[in-house]
Image: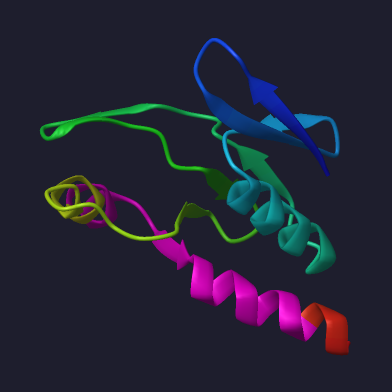
Amino acid sequence: MIEIICENCGTTKVEYNGIIFRSKFEARSAKWMDWARFTWQYEPEKFILNSGGYTPDFYLEELDLWVDTKGWLKKGVCEKYQEFALEHPFLMLFDKDVKLLEKEMKEW
């Protein structure tokens, strides 16, 4: 993984496997999905919900499953996740989940 500093926006983006991710956490999640041999797409579609726009981080094709990665949840944003999950197969991966999965990768 290669970290890229965005001077205009003040954030760090990460390149993994030719894809620029918004965070190191997303790149780590993609790395785990590769290890688990999932076929995935990164932010392939934006959805317009009653609660606003929403772009899930990943789509796992074989499972027809949308995945979003979060270090933590901000107050007031659960509404859009709940609304999305009512219409689509959905999984939320938190940092603690990915850390456990990475541990499994190392032990494999």
- The image shows residue 39 at horizontal and vertical percentages of 74, 51
Compared with residue 33, is residue 88 higher up or lower down, i.e. above or below?
A: above
- The residue under the point 78% across, 69% down is 36
The residue under the point 54% across, 10% down is 8
8 left or right of 99 in image: left
**Residue 84 location, x and y as percent?**
26, 47
Picture layout, residue 29 above or below residue 22: below
Q: Position of residue 22 (x, y in %)?
A: 57, 34
Q: Is residue 70 magenta?
A: no
Q: Position of residue 95 (x, y in %)?
A: 51, 66
**Quarter where residue 48 is shown:** top left
Counting the numbered discs, the total is 0
Q: Is residue 1 left or right of residue 29?
A: right
Looking at the rendering, in which quadrant would you find the C terminus?
bottom right
- State the quadrant of the N terminus: top right
Which range is magenta? 83-104
Residue at screen point 40% across, 34% down: 55
Q: Quadrant of residue 44?
A: top right
Instruction: Residue 95: say if magenta.
Output: yes
Residue 37 against residue 83 in the figure, above or below: below
Judged by its main secondary structure, the magenta piece is helix
Identify the residue at horizontal 20%, vertical 45% (top origin). 80
Q: 74 or 49, which is in the foreground?
A: 74
